[in-house]
Image (cartoon, rainbow, N blue to C red):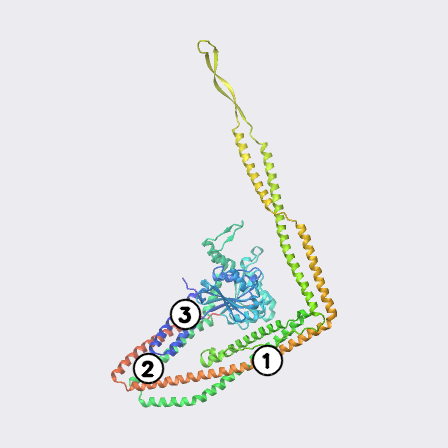
């Protein structure tokens, strides 16, 4: 049986890991701790490297069902109207630190473990059904038992391109750019929206890891002539129609039915037949429905790209290259040592090499300075763009906050504290974005010069504290306090009336329900009594009669009476009339039993009817009307109070709002200006620290190499002076080590050939017809 792309990748990865383990153990024996650590890091990177798959689609496209189908079980709830409100990472349960089923990460940087991730909990933190999810939750990790998620596969459920919170579209786009593959999901019911098409076109220009999925193919109206092919063509036509000449192609499209796939894979799921009876699929039926769903064809294509794409091949090739470089270095050193022991180098040559190394050390300071200049130039190329973006983001934040104050129309609307909170959140977002930009832009430079990521150089990143006082400027004494108290009293009364109204509404609907139940019971009792009476009347006419029949019986007939002797008799046969009422009695008994059962049914219904309280819904409705009239009157009274106060104090109110706006605008201006200058200074400080750290790391690396070479040469000098017996033992050990290095070099070469033989895969683009 042919191995799947995923199985083959896992096996290749294991072969590389085994070879790395052998090399790590060998470096440990030789005492090369730095080389051992370098190989250990390559192994860890290989083992922890993950495939992240982003799924983008509106709830109407069946995204939750699709994710469940991939995982093989209904692990996520399906929301009928709520949408995903944050990014959710679905990982294998082995990724959980302490066996928890999830962890929620909040926007303020805090997190909370979720011991049991049931439907209610997931809804609370994932969907728009939860309270302020979009504003408070940054992302959620869910840990599930699923074969699909094994070997570091992560599914990313995105909030979509019409995210309910500001920035969700950007979060989704950013995740698409970073992920191994992205799935753009469309529905066969309605193939594509304008927003989907626009983002797909934009990302397709810079991202080559997008696959399109046409879900819900089981809903295609085949009885109206629709086919999978015709709906795919409709999707392509819609894309071309919306985007026009700006697009010429669309990524590969794979049709699936997630609903069928999930029904076939999750043996705990049932379905209803045409009569509404709940049924369970047999294993043969499950296999057939999975085949119909086409999910396996899609998964095979997905993992072909994931395991044979550019990123996957690079992740396998990188540790092999590092392994080859290190083993070849060790082999060269062992050969040098062998040549010295064999007398092919003399002391004079070695001393000359030491002198050259001393000269290199003296020149190092100048080289480090030139490297500093070079690195500074590269970092400066990113600086202007990032600082300009910070300033631009700060100005946009300022504009948004000032526009928000346009909604202040009355004194009660003035809310400086709300503006302050929004400013703090906005500045934190700018700081986070700036830090990400700084990291993303400069990580390549760090890797170029140090072949490592120096996390400590970034420190705490960009930070900024909002400062200054914001106290609401109250209007001058115009009876405002009395007006405010009067309005508050009316609002309190309104709240009480609304509470009463809600309570009465609940009572009204409860009594309406009871009344409806009473009416239904009365109708049912009446119908059953009619049925009973009709049955009783109809059976009266069909009661069987008593059957009369004649039989001959022997009778004693006295021929002659005698006084002394017994009468003289004879026996003759006579006709005797008889009756049989057994059929009549059985019929009446059966009829009476049926009538009795019907009487009992009627009695039970009458008892149930008596238990239902009688309510006067009309009186409740009238009371509700009274309360609603009172609410309307109170609202009118409140409006009149405000109108009267505004008429008297309109000028003062306008002045108060204007003063508060000016005060808040000044507060925003001061902080935004300090944000721009503060972040610029922080950038320069971080850049300077980064330059120093890279320079120090370069210097340290060079010095270590020089010192290691000095140490090696001194060791070689000592070996030249060794006794002949010690030399022979050392030569024997070196020969053995060289054999091992050659074995590792051969294995690495074989692995190179293995990975090179894998054809590099990419996602095709389908040309669109005009």
Where's the C terminus, which quadrant?
Answer: bottom right
Decide which of 446, 300 is in the foreground and name it. Answer: 446
Find residue 650 and report its image quarter. bottom right
Residue topped by disc 3: 13
**Helix, strand or loop at disc 3?**
helix
The answer to which of marks 3 and 2 sits earlier in the sequence is 3
Percent from the top left, x then y, of residue 160?
56, 66
Find residue 166 and report its image quarter. bottom right
Horizontal side of residue 377 vs 610, given as left or right:
left
Q: Residue at x 26, y 85 (%)?
A: 723
Q: Nearer the viewer, mark 1 or mark 2?
A: 1
Residue topped by disc 1: 674
The answer to which of marks 1 and 2 sits earlier in the sequence is 2
Asked if disc 1 and disc 3 are in contact, CB closer than 8 Å, the reply is: no
**Helix, strand or loop at disc 1?**
helix
Residue topped by disc 2: 335
């Amino acid at each position: 049986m042919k191995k799947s792309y995923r199985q083959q990748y896992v096996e290749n990865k294991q072969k590389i890991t085994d070879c790395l383990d052998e090399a790590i153990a060998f470096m440990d024996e030789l005492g090369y701790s730095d080389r051992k650590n370098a190989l250990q890091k390559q192994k860890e990177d290989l083992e922890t490297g993950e495939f992240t798959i982003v799924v983008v689609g509106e709830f109407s496209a069946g995204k939750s069902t699709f994710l469940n189908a991939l995982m093989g079980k209904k692990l996520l709830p399906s929301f009928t109207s709520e949408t995903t409100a944050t990014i959710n990472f679905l990982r294998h349960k082995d990724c959980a630190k302490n066996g928890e089923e999830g962890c929620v990460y909040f926007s303020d940087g805090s997190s909370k473990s979720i011991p049991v991730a049931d439907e209610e909990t997931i809804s609370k933190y994932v969907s728009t059904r939860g309270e302020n999810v979009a504003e408070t939750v940054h992302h959620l990790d869910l840990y599930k038992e699923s074969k699909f998620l094994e070997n570091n596969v992560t599914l990313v459920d995105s909030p979509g391109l019409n995210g309910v919170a500001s920035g969700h579209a950007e979060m989704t786009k950013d995740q698409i750019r970073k992920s191994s593959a992205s799935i753009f999901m469309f529905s066969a019911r309605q193939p594509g929206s304008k927003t989907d098409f626009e983002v797909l076109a934009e990302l397709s220009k810079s991202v080559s890891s997008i696959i399109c999925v046409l879900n819900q193919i089981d809903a295609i109206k085949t009885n109206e002539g629709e086919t999978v092919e015709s709906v795919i063509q409709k999707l392509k036509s819609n894309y071309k129609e919306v985007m026009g000449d700006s697009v010429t192609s669309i990524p590969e499209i794979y049709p699936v039915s997630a609903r069928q796939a999930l029904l076939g894979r999750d043996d705990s799921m049932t379905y209803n037949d045409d009569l509404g009876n709940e049924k369970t699929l047999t294993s043969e039926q499950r296999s057939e429905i999975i085949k119909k769903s086409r999910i396996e064809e899609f998964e095979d294509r997905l993992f072909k790209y994931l395991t044979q794409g550019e990123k996957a091949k690079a992740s396998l090739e990188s540790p092999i290259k590092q392994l080859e470089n290190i083993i070849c270095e060790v082999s060269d050193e062992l050969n040098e040592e062998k040549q010295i022991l064999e007398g092919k180098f003399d002391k004079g040559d070695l001393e000359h090499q030491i002198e050259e190394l001393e000269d290199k050390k003296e020149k190092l300071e100048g080289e480090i300075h030139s490297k500093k200049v070079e690195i500074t130039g590269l970092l400066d190329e990113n600086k202007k763009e990032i600082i300009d973006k910070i300033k631009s983001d700060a100005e946009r934040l300022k504009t948004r906050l000032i526009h928000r104050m346009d909604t202040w129309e009355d004194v009660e609307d003035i809310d400086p504290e709300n503006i302050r909170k929004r400013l703090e959140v906005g500045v934190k977002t700018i700081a986070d974005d700036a830090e990400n930009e700084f990291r993303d832009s400069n990580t390549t430079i760090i890797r170029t010069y140090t072949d490592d990521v120096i996390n400590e150089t970034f420190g705490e990143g960009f930070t900024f504290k909002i400062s200054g006082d914001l106290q609401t400027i109250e209007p001058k004494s115009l009876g405002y306090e009395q007006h405010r108290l009067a309005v508050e009293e009316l609002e309190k009364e309104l709240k009480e009336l609304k509470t009463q109204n809600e309570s009465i509404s609940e009572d009204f609907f409860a009594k309406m329900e009871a009344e409806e139940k009473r009416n239904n019971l009365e109708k049912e009792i009446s119908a059953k009594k009619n049925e009973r009476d009709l049955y009783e009347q109809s059976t009266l006419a069909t009661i069987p009669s008593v059957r009369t029949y004649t039989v001959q019986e022997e009778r004693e007939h006295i021929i002659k009476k005698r006084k002394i002797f017994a009468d003289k008799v004879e026996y003759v046969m006579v006709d005797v009339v008889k009756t049989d009422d057994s059929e009549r009695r059985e019929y009446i008994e059966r009829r009476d039993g049926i009538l009795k059962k019907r009487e009992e049914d009627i009695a039970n219904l009458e008892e149930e009817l008596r238990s239902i309280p009688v309510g006067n819904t009309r009186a409740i409705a009238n009371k509700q009307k009274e309360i609603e009239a009172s609410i309307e009157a109170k609202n009118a009274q409140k409006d009149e109070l405000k109108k009267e106060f505004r008429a008297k104090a309109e000028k003062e109110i306008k002045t108060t709002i204007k003063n508060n706006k000016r005060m808040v605008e000044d507060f925003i201006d001061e902080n935004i200006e300090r944000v721009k200058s503060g972040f610029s200074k922080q950038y320069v400080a971080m850049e300077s620290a980064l330059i120093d750290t890279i320079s120090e790391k370069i210097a340290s690396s060079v010095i270590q190499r020089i010192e290691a070479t000095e140490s090696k040469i001194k060791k070689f000098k000592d070996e030249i002076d060794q006794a002949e017996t010690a030399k022979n033992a050392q030569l024997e050990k070196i020969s053995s080590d060289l054999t091992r290095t050659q074995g590792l070099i051969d294995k690495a070469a074989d692995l190179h050939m293995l990975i090179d033989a894998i054809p590099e895969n990419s996602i095709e683009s389908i040309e669109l017809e005009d």
